Image (spheres, grey):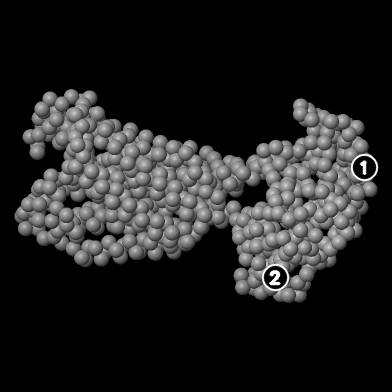
């Protein structure tokens, strides 16, 4: 194989490479050679884009404190060296940042799933208590004490919860292998699935605490209400709180659940913010449920019987407004928040992919070969556009009077200070950028060293016109004054740099040229490949990269990350929708009685079905409207303050979340209503 100006023999093939994820993205095959071969290839000449990386293993498996101390010692010993140090805790800022966002997102959807599951438990307990109301009243009439009733029914709820937790853990053990087999190849890394008893125990503890939290209050209230009140609780509910001991136990379980979430969450800040936001959402939805009930009782009744019955049912004692709006609204709010966070993360990943770009990037063109290179391209493709610029590497070591490592930069621009950056010098403003502040230097300028800084990055670093920065280039520190700020259209993939110096600053430093080649529209892949091969033959030290291959490499990585994000969000969405659909089960007993009475006095199935549909639509629309506002607000706060991702309001994401959830609610609610309509009238009325 020809490598630069020498020929090499392939001696082996590497299947995997340690620490590959921490290195920069490369295009094409990687080649490992010894130093002598590298020197003979003429690929590492002065001015070439060469980066040296040293891997050090400290003695005795150094602890994190030892790593920090070592890094501090190196910085003190070599303050102006121009190199960066990374350790196993943060091997790559870009990788770390992406994984941190995924970790935060997974924490969010985990807590959302937990809460939506709690809504399902609350609905199940409410249905259970509703069905056991007459039994509890009978026990109390026969002399059973409040504590006996409470303990008996709590034991039943916990036994059922334990069965549910066991079934959930069993299902949870089956889902990951299924998903791994289904979409494992599409994920960024192949998951190695293991079963940890501690994780299973934690899942079981979560389930039991959630069941206990949502069961204590209704059980305590049912045990405290007088028998006569229980018999008429459906038509004349009494506002009564449980005993103070039950309230204290509920608060203790809630605090234990919050503490467990904070202790086991990958992102404690997200968990804490989630708990605070959840409290606010519950308060808003409680107020909404009360408001809808109050309004339904006082608004004029429409003339259409179905609508009249639906509104009367909403405002009636024991109506659905409070329970359905609270459970449906809270679940939808969290699902909307997760959907918008998912959409924002995906949009941020997709925004990194270029839309319009040159066809070829060409690296390491020696300055003395620049004219011959341009002539070659024009000979093979006369209509091609060639753009060239000097290319150097340097590291920012000082901003104003402060060392770069001491600057507290926002996360989105920290990369500028991490490692070496591409530098150039230019007589005129580079293509794809424009000066937005200050003045460009005149042609033939020979004064003090000047630099043009990318405007957005400069402002986030607190830099402005007249400030000075120091850059280490080839071991030499160069101080330059900021003369102007530029707005850069990075998505064009034209040759552009964060730092562009005045020509007199860097012209004397050893460097090569970087070029882009834009071929005329309709150029075949064969012609493009032939141009790349001919460049390699006549200029062995030059590297030509097809931009399409680069974009495909980015696409492969980002699409896999987005697949992981969407898979996690989709599981939560479907699970949440199924649980929210169960919220309608709390009304089935009352619905059967109401349908039996309406059928006995001549009501048709169509009218009864229309009555239920109008009631469900009113409650679902009210809950959905508020859920969009609450979910969007929560997503914006989480993205802006915790995940540092631009918020994107996506009607498509909201429509998907609401569509799946409300679709399942309406479908399962319709099944329940059809069962209500199919209930025999006379036997049911006799049983009452």
Please tell me whether mark 1 or mark 2 is closer to you in this view.
2
Give the Cα distance between marks 1 and 2.
42 Å
Quadrant occupied by the N terminus: top right
Position of residue 586 measured from the top left corner of the image (x, y, whole percent): 24, 43
Provide the residue designation for mark 2. 402
> SS class of the residue under badge 2?
strand
Asked whether the viewer can see residue 686, the reply is: yes
Task: Give whichever of discs 1 and 2 has the lower sequence position.
Answer: 1
x 79%, y 65%: residue: 479
| Nearest to the observer: residue 278 or residue 446 | 446
**Position above or below: 317 against 407:** above
| Labels 1 and 2 touching (C-beta < 8 A) | no
> Residue at position x 48%, y 37% from top?
652
Q: Does the rendering let one see residue 323?
A: no
Tag 2: Cα neighbours inside 10 Å, few (<14), some, or many (≥20)?
few
**Does residue 538 appear to the left or right of 89 in the view shown?**
right
Figure quadrant of the C terminus: top left
Q: Secondary structure at mark 1?
A: helix
* Circle count: 2
Q: Nearer the viewer, residue 138 or 496?
A: 496
Near-viewer residue (548 or 483): 483
x then y, percent, for residue 651:
47, 39
Answer with left or right where residue 112 lies relative to residue 504: left
Q: Residue at x 13, y 56 (%)?
A: 225
- 10 Å neighbourhood of mark 1: few (<14), some, or many (≥20)? few
Q: Quadrant of residue 687?
A: top left
Residue ID at (9%, 34%): 685
Residue 60 in the image: above or below residue 29:
below
Q: Which mark is residue 403?
A: none
Q: Residue 349: x, y in percent?
A: 60, 46
Q: Residue 594: horizontal and vertical position, in percent?
A: 16, 35
Which residue is labeled 1 in the image? 371
């Amino acid at each position: 194989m020809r490598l630069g100006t020498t020929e090499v023999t392939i001696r082996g093939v590497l299947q995997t490479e340690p620490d590959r994820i921490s290195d920069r993205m490369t295009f094409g095959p990687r080649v490992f050679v010894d130093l002598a071969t590298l020197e003979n290839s003429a690929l590492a000449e002065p001015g070439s884009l060469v980066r040296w990386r040293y891997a050090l293993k400290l003695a005795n498996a150094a602890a994190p404190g030892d790593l920090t101390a070592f890094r501090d010692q190196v910085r003190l010993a070599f303050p102006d060296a121009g190199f960066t140090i990374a350790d196993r805790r943060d091997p790559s800022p870009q990788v770390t940042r992406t994984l941190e966002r995924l970790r935060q997102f997974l924490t969010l959807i985990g807590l959302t799933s937990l809460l939506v599951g709690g809504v399902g438990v609350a609905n199940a307990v409410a249905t259970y208590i509703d069905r056991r109301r007459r039994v509890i009243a009978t026990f109390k009439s026969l002399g059973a004490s409040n504590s006996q009733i409470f303990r008996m029914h709590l034991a039943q709820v916990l036994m059922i919860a334990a069965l549910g937790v066991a079934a959930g853990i069993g299902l949870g053990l089956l889902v990951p292998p299924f998903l791994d087999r289904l979409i494992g190849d599409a994920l960024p890394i192949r998951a190695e699935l293991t079963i940890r008893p501690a994780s299973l125990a934690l899942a079981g503890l979560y389930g039991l605490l959630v069941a206990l939290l949502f069961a204590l209050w209704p059980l305590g209230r049912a045990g405290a209400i007088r028998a006569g009140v229980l018999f008429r609780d459906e038509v004349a509910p009494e506002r009564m709180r449980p005993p103070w001991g039950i309230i204290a136990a509920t608060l203790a379980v809630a605090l234990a659940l919050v503490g467990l979430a904070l202790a086991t969450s990958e992102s404690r800040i997200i968990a804490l913010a989630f708990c605070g936001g959840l409290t606010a959402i519950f308060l808003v939805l409680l107020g909404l449920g009360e408001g809808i009930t109050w309004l339904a009782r006082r608004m004029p009744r429409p003339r259409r019987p179905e609508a009249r019955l639906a509104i009367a049912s909403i405002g009636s004692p024991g109506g659905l407004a409070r329970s359905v709006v609270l459970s449906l609204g809270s679940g939808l709010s969290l699902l909307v928040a997760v959907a918008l966070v998912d959409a924002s993360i995906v949009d941020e990943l997709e925004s990194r992919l270029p839309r319009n770009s040159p066809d070829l990037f060409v690296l390491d063109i020696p300055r003395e070969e620049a004219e011959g290179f341009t002539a070659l391209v024009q000979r093979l493709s006369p209509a091609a556009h060639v753009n060239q610029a000097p290319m150097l590497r340097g590291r920012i070591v000082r901003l104003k009077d402060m060392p770069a490592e001491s600057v507290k930069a926002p996360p989105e621009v920290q990369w500028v200070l991490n490692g070496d950056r591409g530098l150039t010098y230019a007589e005129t403003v580079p293509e794809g950028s424009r000066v937005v502040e200050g003045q460009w230097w005149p042609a033939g300028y020979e004064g003090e060293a000047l630099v043009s800084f990318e405007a957005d990055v400069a402002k986030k670093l607190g830099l402005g016109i007249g400030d000075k920065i120091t850059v280490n280039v080839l071991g030499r520190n160069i101080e330059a004054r900021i003369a102007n700020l530029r707005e850069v259209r990075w998505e064009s993939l034209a040759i552009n740099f964060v730092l562009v110096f005045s020509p007199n600053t860097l012209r004397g430093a050893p460097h090569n040229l970087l070029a882009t080649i834009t071929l005329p529209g309709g150029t075949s892949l064969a012609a493009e490949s032939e141009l790349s091969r001919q460049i390699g033959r006549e200029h062995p030290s030059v590297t030509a990269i097809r931009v399409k291959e680069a974009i495909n490499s980015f696409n492969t990585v980002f699409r896999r990350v987005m697949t992981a994000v969407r898979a996690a969000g989709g599981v939560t969405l479907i699970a949440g929708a199924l649980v929210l659909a169960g919220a309608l089960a709390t009304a089935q007993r009352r619905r059967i009685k109401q349908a039996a009475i309406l059928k006995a006095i001549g009501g048709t199935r169509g009218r009864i079905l229309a009555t239920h549909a109008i009631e469900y639509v009113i409650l679902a629309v009210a809950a959905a409207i508020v859920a969009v506002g609450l979910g969007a607000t929560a997503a914006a706060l989480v993205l802006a303050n915790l995940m540092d991702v631009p918020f994107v309001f996506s009607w498509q994401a909201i429509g998907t979340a609401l569509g799946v959830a409300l679709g399942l609610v309406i479908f399962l609610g319709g099944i329940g209503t059809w069962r209500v309509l199919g209930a025999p009238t006379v036997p049911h009325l006799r049983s009452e």
